[in-house]
Image (spheres, rainbow, N blue to C red):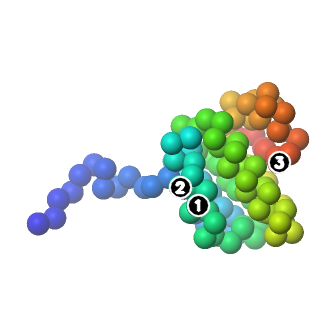
Amino acid sequence: MTTTSATASVTESGFYVNDSRWCYRGVLTLDDSAAVLKKSESLPLPISSVVDMSELDENDSAALAIFLSLTRRAEREGKTLRFEAVPEALRTLAHVYGVDSLLALQAA
């Protein structure tokens, strides 16, 4: 017997490839950051260097930790990353923590 529920259509949070860029969909908080980072390791870095965060929902400082980790990975691989459509609150938090100069964050 197959049942259908409202949660069946919910997409898991995480990065996905869209053409030559990565996109992020869903929540990115401390609770799911380790799983998100682990899953991202299986994706090749985006060809365009763009990580589109326009579908980011709830987030906290763990998102910045993920951004820093991905930026370090890109540097190890001889590439760069640019995070686009980053919510203002997250950009402000990066400034307060003093990591905004380490990350290429662009406004939503």
- Answer above or below: position of 77 versus 36: below
Q: Residues at badges 2 and 1 in contact (C-beta under 8 Å)?
A: yes
Query: Can residue 22 be seen?
Result: yes
Q: Earlier in the sequence, mark 1 or mark 3?
A: 1
What secondary structure is found at the residue carrying circle 2? helix
Query: Can residue 88 be seen?
Result: no
* Mark 3 or mark 2, whichever is nearer to me: 2
What secondary structure is found at the residue carrying circle 1? helix
Residue, disc 3: 104
Relative side of 9 to 60, left or right: left
Residue, disc 2: 35
Q: Where does the image place residue 36, in percent across and percent down from the top left? A: 56, 55
Q: Within the image, what quadrant is residue 78 found in?
A: bottom right
**Residue in the picture at 58% in, 38% down:** 59
Q: Within the image, what quadrant is residue 77 found in?
A: bottom right
The label shown at residue 38 is 1
Q: Amino acid at mark 2?
A: Ala
